[in-house]
Image (tube, coloured by chain):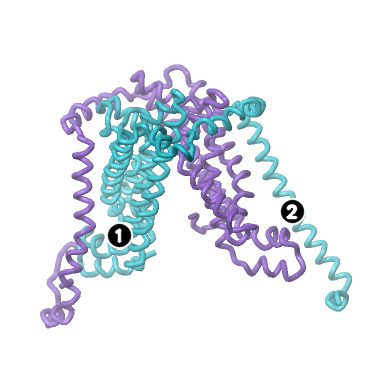
Amino acid sequence: MSARHPMLVADAGAVLDRHRGLFNDPPLRRVSALVGPLGVAGFTIFSVWWLAIPFSQIGPGLASLAKFIALMFPPSSGGHLDLLVRAMGETLAIAFLGTLIATVVAFPVSFLAAKNTTPHGVIRFAIRRCLDTIRGVDALIWALVFVGVVGLGPFAGILAIAVSDTGALGKLFSEAIESTEERARESVLASGGTSLLAVRFGLLPQVLPIIAGQILYYFESNVRSATIIGIVGAGGIGLQLSEQIRTYDFDQVAFAVIMILVTVATIDWISGKLRFAIIGRRAVV
Amino acid sequence: MISSLLSVPQARLEALLADYQREVGRRRRQSLLVLAILAILIVMAGRFGEVDLDNLVRNISNFTSYFGRIIPKLTIANFGADVADWYWNIAGWLKLLLDTVLIAYLGTLIGACGAFMFAFFAAENLAPGSVLRWSIKRVFEFCRTVPDLVFALMFVSAFGLGPLAGILAIAIHSFGTLGKLFTEAVENIDMRPVEGVRSTGSRFVEMVRFGALPQVMSVFVSYTLLRFEINVRSGSVVGMVGAGGIGQDLFVAIRKFYYTDVSAILLMIIVSVAIIDLVTERIRHRLSGQDGIR
């Protein structure tokens, strides 16, 4: 394999001549192929200059980072394992209920936002823009808002995830509805079914597996985002984690991070199995 | 009409109906079981999550009045001055917004470059060694599971306040997510060109460069652009812990109840994310059209 033999073609030169066009791009194409990379490089230089990145800080920063990492071993729960387990449970509860509420709200809304089931184009447009706006605001900002409404604690986190995911799931569900085959619905209508029956027996069987896959995917990603939502006081393990980083208790940071990694891996594994059971090998968009 | 359709003998019909009932009953029982499990989980999660509907109902007026308050008072008669009053700090905010976009840009770029270098070693169909492959995959997993805010907090402690911490936090998170996506893209390529290149006796680098890269390049760029858009959004959050950008101002505005400032900054973020979304979508469409891959 690694030994390289010369080309065993008698008229290698002639072959090369015949395919000369493949090796010589016209000059204009050569120039235009450079635009992208040069643009990226130029913008990078501009960014570094504009942000005035202090390169002198990188050395000492890496040194203190190494110190932090050395402090992480051995990881320790710092004597409040029960507190951490409770916080992790809170995190899971936030992700679960947040996803559930978002699903329950987004599902009916998505029918109004889908081209083939909406009662009117104006309604579709208005709902789409609403969903876009909700989605444009990060879950953490929703968490800050809800901490102001219902006070500190995991309930604020649940509401934050529910609201921000309603935007995302509503969009995905309506796209799933739009990509269904019309024929099944039409045949229900043709056999005398009402439009409600047409949706139940002609449309739902097509979208439910896709929607179920998307819900599971969002649950996984919400477990990840629910781990940070606590930083603003909205429950879950994020509160402990941010406190420990601020007080330089890096052995406890490492412990909490390991807990998050194990939990997320377990959830991913379970939901992977569930997804496989529901939709088989089909990819989830 | 109907009787003529039902020409199945009575006994046969009954058997078929019984089969149908049994099948429907089985599926009903299955759904009931799923619903029961779901109900148990909801009750458990509700207790863990301290769900307090009473509290929500009592305070929901806070929520609606919050949005009432963040909407600025704009009058037609005095529109220009009102807008100027609303965006009293437009110059400062625009500068911070640009900071956020550039932090996201550099973070995405570093993360994408890292992911690009390692993705080929992590892909099942190309990886030279399975131990190497396994360890790279675990590193990707670690980088994308640990929240970017946690990295940002640590980097702020190590490198000091400022954009450097934000860039590094976003870079590490993007490295993890893009690494996974890039690896999956490489695993889905058509292996024939790779084998063609390999059959000429080429080494790993040449195999990747001429066999795999032409197939995945446009997918890589398109994932990176998508990630950039996501990172602009999360860049505004990372700023909250002091890692540069507009997040700090937004955090202060929310915490100190500068209501109209909150709406002003949020609107700026939403608009800029929407613009970036539009531009990157254009580029992605052009790329996928040009190469005909995906």
Instruction: Give the percent coordinates (x, y) of residue B11.
Output: 88, 70
Q: Chain of mark 2?
A: B
Q: Colour of chain A?
A: purple
Crowding at mark 1 (Cα within 10 Å: few <14, some 14-19, many 20+): some
Res B237 visible: no
**Residue drawn at (53%, 52%) of the image:** A172
Q: Is B281 left, or right, of B3 in this rendering?
A: left
Vertical arrangement, residue B270 with respect to residue A33, above or below? above
Q: Residue furthest left?
A: A13
Q: Is residue B17 left or right of residue B290?
A: right
Among numbered discs 1 and 2, the one appearing first in the sequence = 2
Residue most toward the front? B77
Residue matched to label 2: B26
Q: Which residue is painted at 18% across and 39% down in the image? A: A49
Residue B54: image tag: none
Q: Secondary structure at mark 1?
A: helix
The foreground one among A104 and B129 is: A104
Indicate the colour of chain B: cyan
Query: The disc numbered 1 marks a residue on which chain?
Result: B
Disc 2 residue type (three-letter): Arg
Give me the disc on residue B217.
1
Give the amino acid at mark 1. Answer: Met
The image quarter in which residue A202 lies: bottom right
**Residue A2 sits in which quadrant?**
bottom left
